[in-house]
Image (cartoon, rainbow, N blue to C red):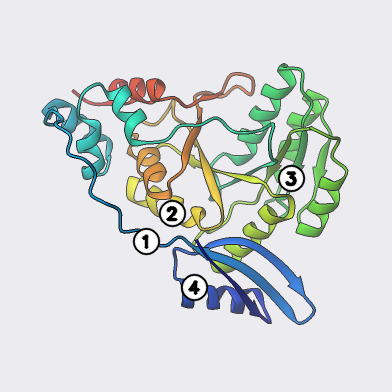
Amino acid sequence: MRLKLFRGTTITEAMARVRTELGAEALILATRRVGDGVEITAALEPEEDLPPPPRQDRPPPNAAALARLAWHGVPEALGHQLAQGDLTHALARSLTFAALPLDQHPLLVVGPPGAGKTLTIARLATRLVMAGVTPMVITADGSRAGATEQLASFTRLLGVNLVVASHPVALARAFALRPENTPVLIDSPGIDPFNPTAQLELAELKATCNAIVALVLAAGCDPAESADIAHAFRATGASHMIATKLDIARRLGGPIAAAAAGKLFLAEAGIGDGAANGLVPLTPALLAERLNRSAIP
């Protein structure tokens, strides 16, 4: 991985230098303000000349399965992989599934406006409380009217204090008060992931507390748009994905395309309205069942 330090008098100027030299694939690893401006540590994963994969005599794609996946909007090349053999096994082979590491790092939930970030935080907090663990819940969303009140209504019911920290400095102070080994859930403002300034601000939040970043994205979004959004959030450090509204989406190519394009771990799925049971681990079996259920024969 290639690392480099960039400086600028403003966030926009520093980000522009990153994009000019490293391109849109650059990952923002750290940011900090210095006396005369901003410093950004960015990285670019080098393209590797990998040897061709060993030849495998796989059966040809099943025509009916291929048509079903195409109806969902699954990208064509990925659809051919998933249409070979059992769908559950094909999903496990072609995509990566992993649980959120809530006991290891703070979790920063990100996404475009309206994706369901705040409700996701409430659901994760509910899960922890029901398991006998009291999390620290922080909102960094100071831009959306009513955002703090919405989350506070959930945390009050759970008996959990809500910390408001809409700036990296405030977030650092709040995080310093965390009791040892306490899971931390951080709600962030919805942003335009293609805006360099918004990207950098999100990267600053991540770097402040060394958070794991999970992208929240509605399952029914257009697959191509979902892929672009996931790729952009990957540049800010996103590593996991939570697919919301899986229960009301008929065509599920969006989360599949997003996970593939952003190289994200599929972690959780929103499947209902309830705070206690509306979020479940997203597994290959669950995704296969939903793909088979939703498709038009």
Nearest to N terminus: mark 2 or mark 3: 3
Q: Tell me the residue that label 2 is attached to.
A: 231
Q: CA distance from mark 1 to mark 3?
A: 37 Å
**Residue 241 locus on image (x, y percent):** 50, 39
Q: Residues within 10 Å of mark 3 (few under 14, many from 20)?
A: many
The residue positioned 66% from the left and 49% from the top of the image is 188
Q: Tell me the residue that label 4 is attached to.
A: 19
Q: Amino acid at mark 3?
A: Thr
Q: Residues within 10 Å of mark 1 (few under 14, many from 20)?
A: few
Nearest to N terminus: mark 4 or mark 2: 4
Q: Tell me the residue that label 3 is attached to.
A: 139
Which mark is in front, 1 or 3?
Answer: 1
Is residue 267 in view from this perspective? yes
Nearest to N terminus: mark 2 or mark 1: 1
Nearest to N terminus: mark 3 or mark 4: 4
Q: Tell me the residue that label 1 is attached to.
A: 47
**Residue 268 locus on image (x, y percent):** 52, 30
Nearest to N terminus: mark 1 or mark 4: 4
- From the viewer's perspective, is residue 38 above or below residue 118? below
Q: Residues within 10 Å of mark 2 (few under 14, many from 20)?
A: many
Q: Amino acid at mark 4?
A: Arg
